[in-house]
Amino acid sequence: QKEVEQDPGPLSVPEGAIVSLNCTYSNSAFQYFMWYRQYSRKGPELLMYTYSSGNKEDGRFTAQVDKSSKYISLFIRDSQPSDSATYLCAMSWMDSSYKLIFGSGTRLLVRP
Amino acid sequence: NAGVMQNPRHLVRRRGQEARLRCSPMKGHSHVYWYRQLPEEGLKFMVYLQKENIIDESGMPKERFSAEFPKEGPSILRIQQVVRGDSAAYFCASSPRVAGQPGEQFFGPGTRLTVL
């Protein structure tokens, strides 16, 4: 079993839809949760960074963390074709390195 | 404020040659992470360095791979005697970590290594 599970998709939605992306994890030590967006053949771009259960909103993006269920989500409102990319969840825990453990990524396609 | 820079962006090597990948962190960042992304897979941690120190190399293959982050200049990931299985995208991330606190990790554009 992988430490972080993420549905690979692809997820195809019409422009303007609300998108829900999810990850589950098995390691209860994870404390810090991130979402990255990666366009084809580019580096990951940090979208959201949270370290507590609950919601965090930034523009059209909302990150949700439920530590009791070991489940995190990213919601994208009013999705745009430019949101078409691979979305990676990442997690880390309190140790000397805070290295990130990534999900395998979900491919999102927003149709005009 | 320039982002994380990596060069070269593309590198082609024949089996048995050496590959050197360079990473310049964002200004003010003294923490560097290297990750590898194999085709159709997620990113995997390789090594974490601070200036002149390797802090965590738990993700590095035991042989042929090494990393450094000298006092002056970029961080270098070195792969000796490359094999086809080393073909991947290698990403560097830098962080402004304050002691005892995790910092956000900002990624560079990556180096795509192809081994012929």
Image (cartoon, grey):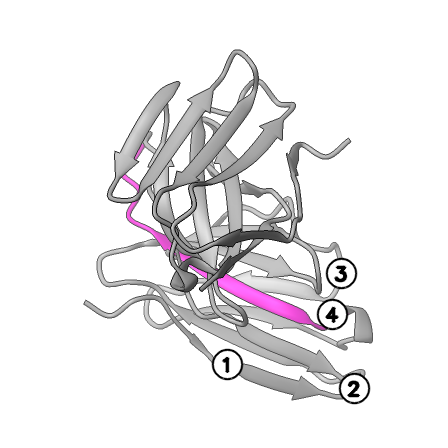
How crowded pointer 1 is (Cα within 10 Å; few <14, some 14-19, many 20+) is rated as some
Amino acid at the residue labelled 4: Asp
Q: Are marks 1 and 3 on the same chain?
A: yes
Residue B109 location (% of width, % of height): 45, 70
Q: Quadrant of residue A6?
A: top right
**Quadrant in the rendering for residue A82:** bottom left
Between marks 2 and 3 in the image, the one whose residue lies nearer the viewer: 2
Q: Which amino acid lies under the numbered mark 1 shown in the image of this protein?
A: Arg
Judge whether residue B52 is colored magenta.
no
- The stretch in magenta equals B86-99
Q: Residue at x 73, y 66 (%)?
A: B64
Which badge, 2 or 1, comes first in the chain's sequence?
Answer: 1
Q: Is residue B41 left or right of residue A43?
A: right
Q: Earlier in the sequence, mark 2 or mark 4?
A: 4
The residue carrying mark 2 is B116
The disc, 3 or 4, on the residue closer to the chain's N-terminal end is: 3
Say left or right for A105 vs B102: right
Name the secondary structure under disc 1: loop
Residue underneath mark 1: B9
Amino acid type, callout 2: Leu
What residue is shown with label 3? B63
Quadrant containing the N terminus of chain A is top right
Per the model, the C-alpha gap separating discs 1 and 3 is 24 Å
* C-alpha separation, residue under disc 2 versus residue under disc 1: 17 Å
Crowding at label 2, few (<14), some or many (≥20) Cα neighbours within 10 Å?
few
Q: Is residue A104 above or below residue A67?
A: below
Q: Chain of mark 4?
A: B
Kindly identify which residue carries mark 4.
B86
Both marks 2 and 4 on one chain? yes
Alpha carbons under labels 1 and 4: distance apart: 16 Å
